[in-house]
Amino acid sequence: MQGTWTDRSPGEDSVLISTAHPVTHTALLGLGVYRPRRSVPNSEIVDRIDSSDEWIRTRSGITARGWAEPDETIVAMSVNAARRALAAAGIAAEQIDAVVLATSSQMVLGPSAGAVVATELGLHDTAAFDVSAGCAGFCYALGNAAALVRAGQARHVLVIGVERLSDLLDPTDRTCAFIFADGAGAVVVGPSESEGIGPVAWGSDGSQTSAIKQDKDFTEYFAEVAAAEEAGERSQRPYIRMNGQAVFRWAITFLEKACRDALDRAGITASDLDAFVPHQANSRITDALVRTLGLPDTVAVARDIVESGNTSAASVPMAMEQLLRTGEARHGDLALLLGFGAGLAYAGQVVRLPPLA
């Protein structure tokens, strides 16, 4: 009879739904990054924020940062990093089954940057989506990608972290103008004979959204634009605002737990690590985490922030590349990754470092 149905448990005469074929282990198969052509030293920005090179270095560790030129778009930087990651992995673009792209600075809501990047790479009818988790975005995307491969939903997943934060900076803001930067990093995730990506430890605290946020939503912005046009004035675009002290307090009091959770889930201890790759937020936060975790001197610690600034979702893969490029760490080394920031959100996992092209 129309409008009724029968709840019947599967039996011998039932049609069964097929399932994907899961795999046991995943790994990072290749890594590639893109750094903007333009490097901006502290001397270029200190006058506008009434600061000094010494003050910036002391507060953050930053000496320079990469700011993208007009042609270095979210998509262009992503495609460049992705091609390098594919080359490092020895994987052809057509072998990619999904693209997971993490960013907080794509200036349009649709289409997703991931979908456009997939097309630019020559992929057709490939799953692609964006992740918005602030500076934890890459590690969030990596956790999702590893789960897709383990579940058999994809064999190879391209994970990208990319930002053009220079578009969202108030050049006169003493708290932010010297910190944030641009760039992209990508990895290929795929099946492996042994485990190369540990379980993700992640979480968020939405009660602290004011610590790092866009200072107005787009509804407010459009209303200001209309009012400014009527008055013959110019409106101010949305900018990133940050309460640095609030972020610092949260980082040094909470992130030890996040790190130890990731280590415990992977079944290792801090003394087993070869490298530590935290989000490049601030050198003082990195130093505090190293001390709190009791990392031995043999552990290589990523310091990409010095010349690259804080690149948010691109930070962790770019910092991995810096360690590998300089020889401070090697392909196959055991590393703890940790992304944290706006949300406030965090995510971390233990990995075997991938090869570079």
Image: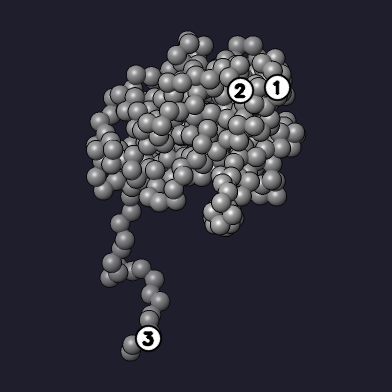
Identified at 60% across, 11% down, the residue is 298
Label 2: how many Cα within 10 Å (few below 14, some 14–19, many 20+): some
Disc 2 element: loop
- Is 74 situated left or right of 65 in this image? left
Q: Which amino acid lies under the numbered mark 3 shown in the image of this protein?
A: Gly
Which one is in front, 88 or 22?
88
Q: Which residue is mark 1?
A: 51
Quarter of the figure with residue 170: top right
Q: Residue furthest front?
A: 232
Residue contact between numbered discs 1 and 2, judged by CB atoms under 8 Å: yes
Identified at 48% across, 11% down, the residue is 326
Comes first in the chain, label 1 or label 2: 2
Q: Position of residue 167 (x, y in %)?
A: 51, 36
Q: Which residue is mark 3?
A: 3
Disc 3 element: loop
Which quarter of the figure is the C terminus placed in?
A: top left
